[in-house]
Image (cartoon, rainbow, N blue to C red):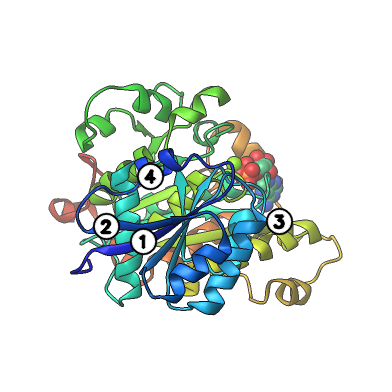
Amino acid sequence: MPSRPVKALLAIEPGVDAEQVQASLPADSDFNVVGMVAGAEDALRWLRDGAADMLLVACAGYSDRALLLLDAVSRQNPDLAVVVLGHGSPNGFLRRAFEAGADDIIMLPSTRDHVRFEIHKLLARRQGAEAPTHGDQSRLVCVLGPKGGTGKTLTSTNLAVALAQRGQRVALIDLDLQFGDVALCLGLPPEKTVYDLAQSPGALDFDKLDAFLATHSSGVRTLIAPRRPDQASAVGAELLREVYSILRANFDWVVVDTPPGFTAEVITSIDSASDVVMVGMLDSLSLKNTKLGLETLELMKYDPDRIFLLLNRAHSRVGISQSDVEAVLGRTPDIFIPSDREIPRTVNEGIPIVVARPQSEPAEAFGRLADLLGGPAIEEAAAVAAAPAANGGSRRRLFGRKV
Ligand SMILES: Nc1ncnc2c1ncn2[C@@H]1O[C@H](COP(=O)(O)OP(=O)(O)O)[C@@H](O)[C@H]1O
Ligand SMILES: [Mg+2]
């Protein structure tokens, strides 16, 4: 955290309620808005004098003016921290904003505390300080895919169960808040959902959250998506961040299944993630979208070593070869999942393929994904979990049940 107050210049785009934006900015002594401007020229003039450490650009939607400002600023003041305060996530704007030089995007409405946290995190990162880390080794894996029907839910559910089969404590979150189907894929009744959690009064702690997590027979604890699409808006980024933080303190792994694209919730989750699994499919449209997704992560400065690429329906005979895939995506997929008739069957039965057909090719590939993410640590844990019962005292417990 900087020792002197942060000096921020606030650029307000047409259509933005300046008062509302100011109401979400930190109100404490280590953050000062030193000026408020409407246009790029004014902003550049202010910045030329070195009067600010940070530029905040508040936009109402897709704004070419804002992109031009970002572009000009990143050329004139390449070292300045630039944050876009956005409303909604208009198609392509977030990606273009990162391309034009934004360091971070904060979605409004948001709380002062969150904006303050993001601003200080960005400045700390820029000063080379470590962003806040989770003291333990817990991991949050965000399963992404730019299109519906590519296999994100298939991957999240099977990865979560494969990790549990390796003796890991796993929480699985269905972030497809409108059309989530994790509960169906795991055969869980949607008794309590994240909507019910959002509606329940009082502060959030693990005991409270625990009551909203369904338990799968593998031991995976699941936060189920709302029953109806209109309930999705009750789940905000603030709640998600709290949920992730509590889960990471209490589980070895948090796996997040996402809706298609980079929605505000997805961006929040990527921000909290230690790893990303990008799911692509073997057709040219899906590959193009997968490439855009990978590029967006790169623009968000996501560590490329923490991105795993999974190609689903990888052996389909659709006239695209592996070298075509590599040429389009610029990298070799880490995991290949073949098309398999058993997959829709296991989805319909609500039994993940890693349980229903553990010897099948897709199940083994999901196991390899778990091993790839976990590395040697998971092999050790798997050995402990698989140890004979005589060794019961030292065997790992999953939520009170010995496995
Ligand atoms: N490798 C595969 N082989 C056969 N069917 C598949 C495969 N991958 C996905 N499917 C089918 O496609 C459907 C959509 O997959 P899903 O994981 O729900 O996609 P997403 O979550 O990305 O929208 C699944 O229910 C399953 O029936
Ligand atoms: Mg899905």
**Marker disc for residue 8:** 1
Q: Position of residue 325 (x, y in %)?
A: 74, 71
- The amino acid at mark 1 is Ala
**Marker disc for residue 289:** none
Residue matched to label 3 = 313
**Residue reaching furthest to the left:** 393
Task: Answer yes or no: is residue 99 visible.
Answer: yes
- The amino acid at mark 3 is Arg
For marks 2 and 3 on the same chain, the one whose residue lies earlier in the sequence: 2
Alpha-carbon distance for marks 1 and 3? Answer: 49 Å
- The amino acid at mark 2 is Phe
Residue matched to label 2 = 31
Alpha-carbon distance for marks 4 and 2? Answer: 12 Å
In terms of secondary structure, where does tag 3 sit? loop
For marks 4 and 1 on the same chain, the one whose residue lies earlier in the sequence: 1
Q: Residues within 10 Å of mark 3 (few under 14, many from 20)?
A: some
Alpha-carbon distance for marks 4 and 1? Answer: 12 Å
- Depth check, mark 2 against mark 3: the one in front is 2
- Depth check, mark 1 against mark 3: the one in front is 1
Alpha-carbon distance for marks 4 and 3? Answer: 48 Å
Tell whether 388 sits left or right of 52: left
Q: Position of residue 119 (x, y in %)?
A: 34, 59
Alpha-carbon distance for marks 2 and 3? Answer: 50 Å
Identify which residue is drawn at 39% across, 41% down. 110
Q: Are the residues at dot 1 and dot 2 in contact (C-beta closer than 8 Å)?
A: yes
In terms of secondary structure, where does tag 1 sit? strand
**Marker disc for residue 22:** 4
For marks 1 and 3 on the same chain, the one whose residue lies earlier in the sequence: 1
- The amino acid at mark 4 is Gln
Please, is residue 211 above or below residue 358 in the view?
above
